[in-house]
Image (cartoon, grey):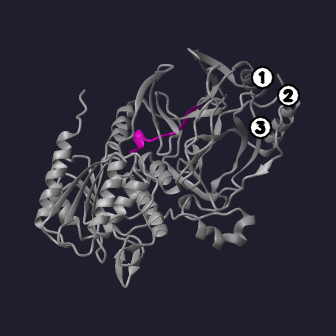
């Protein structure tokens, strides 16, 4: 073994996401981490690089993301970090189980080396773990976190990688990087780094010769970085690793730390990053993450870059949120979508009457037509701008998911309640983003897209209420929408009522009765 410093712990882990807004909502609002830096990818400045951590972005707490919008999901596998584990107090495990389950995050409980583990995934499939520990890990708690300090994440606990062979990697970890093999369980091997008092001092290797190789994409880890305290020590690492036959890159300045990169024998991309200078080099500690920070070479392009990046500063739609009006929250959220010329207040009362034990999210359409609010553009009466329909449907879908997390609503119990133009955008979201709505109540709808790629809507329940005297909505268009939804596997109930385009008391009664009936017919989880 070379005489050199030993790795003290994990510095940061960088992963890939498929939506910047969903990513921010999940890690900041649900997990309570602080966005400590909002910058861009050095190789693709039209994509964010988001950094989350404790109040200061301390090494050992930093999880970073490249969120490429709507990037297809990847597949964690051999040659990748396949789980990112955070440390929490052992007595916080029950709190986290309840919080995750209340937000429709599927969890699995296990034990590992005597510690309780909650396994789950983020919205894009990244495997995460919360591990309860007895020893206190020093962490700078963010005072604006959504999580009480006693239950908060204190930083990394460990990372798990999946390999087909152990020996070459074990040699690198022990003989070159100075880690110690601390124990094993079945095919899991735990390597310890030197600073056991700080966050992220453990690295687990799971060995499976038959494991399939990973595929990069949303929900996968790009690389893992280990700590070094100075530029001088980093140069020692570079020299000694090269002497051990490892192909190491030149030092690269990442503004908040300096980095060298190399692949370990199993294929995982490793980085050794310096602790300094840290995230306060371009923002004060109390303002971390509030402004877009660009590498110096991209400052001349700031205006163009800002125009291409998605908005992270707000939920992006003027909207109203109302919690359940009566006791006994049914965990459903009605997304109320107004018609042409309406606003975020129009359908609140209707939604309340349809289901008083549901929460309501009611956005205002962002398209103006002769001063009237709509959810997408049209070229003429009954002729839609389908490119705009697609764009606005994805935009609304992103908002609904982000708002659901922000308001602590479960993610798989949403009901669209749309009238006219709102019913049409609800149908478009159902066709383009079927994960958004569990049920839909469509009042006076018509077909929003002529030839979409038909998704799998099995398990979705949809009510269509058509006015038999409606002179604005062609009956054949409504029938075409109904048939398309049925062909996709949805259970569609069509009711023609004695009305025109206006809403009536019967719409409210029919919608309420139908939703209650659907609730009764849904399977109830026992146990």
In the displayed orientation, state which residue is furthest to the front: 476
Q: Residue tagged by mark 1? A: 175
Above or below, 374 relative to 288:
below
Mark 1 Cα within 10 Å, few/some/many (few <14, many 20+)? some
Q: Is residue 269 magenta?
A: no
Circle 2 Cα neighbour tier, 10 Å, few/some/many (<14 / 14–19 / ≥20): few
**Residue at coordinates 52% horizontally, 46% vertically from top-left?**
140
90 relative to 304, above or below = above
- Residue farthest to the bottom, as pictured: 370
Disc 1 to disc 2: CB gap under 8 Å: yes
Query: What secondary structure is marked by label 2?
Result: loop
Q: Tell me the CA gap for discs 2 and 3.
A: 12 Å
**Residue visible at 19% across and 50% down?**
515
Q: Quadrant of residue 402?
A: bottom left
Provide the residue designation for mark 3: 262
Q: Earlier in the sequence, mark 1 or mark 2?
A: 1
Q: Quadrant of residue 46?
A: bottom right
Stretch of the chain drawn in magenta: 148-159
**226 sits to left or right of 341:** right
Which badge, 2 or 3, is on the more N-terminal residue?
Answer: 2
């Amino acid at each position: 073994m070379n005489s050199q410093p030993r790795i003290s712990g994990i510095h940061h882990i960088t992963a890939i996401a498929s939506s910047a807004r969903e990513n921010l909502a999940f890690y900041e609002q649900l997990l309570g981490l602080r966005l400590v830096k909002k910058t861009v990818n050095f190789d693709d400045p039209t994509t964010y690089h988001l950094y989350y951590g404790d109040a200061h972005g301390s090494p050992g707490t930093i999880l970073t993301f490249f969120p490429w919008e709507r990037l297809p999901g990847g597949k964690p596998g051999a040659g990748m970090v396949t789980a990112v584990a955070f440390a929490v107090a052992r007595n916080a495990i029950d709190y986290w189980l309840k919080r995750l389950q209340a937000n429709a995050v599927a969890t699995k409980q296990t034990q590992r080396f005597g510690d309780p583990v909650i396994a789950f995934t983020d919205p894009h499939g990244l495997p995460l773990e919360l591990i309860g520990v007895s020893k206190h890990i020093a962490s700078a708690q963010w005072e604006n976190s959504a999580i009480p300090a006693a239950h908060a994440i204190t930083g990394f606990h460990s990372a798990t990688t999946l390999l087909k062979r152990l020996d070459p990697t074990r040699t690198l970890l022990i003989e070159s990087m100075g880690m110690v093999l601390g124990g094993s369980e079945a095919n899991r091997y735990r390597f310890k780094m030197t600073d056991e008092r700080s966050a992220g001092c453990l690295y687990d290797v799971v060995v499976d010769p038959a494991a399939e190789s990973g595929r990069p994409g949303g929900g996968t880890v790009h690389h893992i970085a280990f700590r070094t305290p100075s530029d001088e020590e980093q140069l020692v690492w570079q020299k000694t690793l090269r002497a051990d036959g490892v192909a190491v890159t030149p030092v690269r300045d990442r503004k908040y730390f300096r980095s060298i990169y190399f692949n370990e024998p199993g294929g995982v991309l490793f980085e050794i990053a310096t602790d300094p200078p840290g995230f306060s080099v371009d923002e004060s500690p109390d303002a971390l993450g509030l402004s877009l920070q660009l590498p110096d070479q991209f400052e001349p392009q700031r205006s163009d870059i800002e125009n291409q990046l998605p908005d992270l500063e707000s939920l992006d739609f003027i909207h109203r949120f109302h919690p359940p009006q009566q006791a006994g929250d049914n965990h459903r959220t009605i997304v109320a979508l107004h018609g042409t010329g309406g606003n975020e207040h129009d359908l609140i009362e209707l939604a309340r009457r349809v289901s008083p034990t549901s929460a309501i999210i009611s956005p205002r359409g962002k398209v103006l037509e002769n001063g009237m609010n709509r959810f997408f553009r049209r070229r003429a009466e009954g002729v839609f701008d389908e490119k705009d329909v697609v764009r606005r449907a994805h935009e609304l879908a992103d908002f609904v998911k982000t708002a659901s997390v922000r308001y602590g609503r479960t993610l798989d119990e949403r009901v669209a309640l749309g009238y006219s133009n709102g019913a049409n955008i609800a149908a478009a979201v159902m066709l383009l983003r079927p994960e958004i709505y569990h049920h839909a109540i469509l009042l006076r709808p018509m077909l929003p897209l002529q030839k979409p790629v038909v998704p799998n809507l099995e398990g979705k329940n949809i009510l269509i209420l058509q006015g038999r005297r409606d002179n604005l909505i062609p009956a054949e268009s409504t029938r075409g929408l109904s048939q398309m939804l049925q062909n996709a596997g949805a259970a569609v109930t069509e009711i023609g009522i004695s009305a025109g385009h206006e809403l009536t008391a019967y719409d409210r009664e029919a919608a309420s009765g139908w939703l209650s009936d659907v609730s009764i017919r849904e399977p109830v989880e026992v146990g």
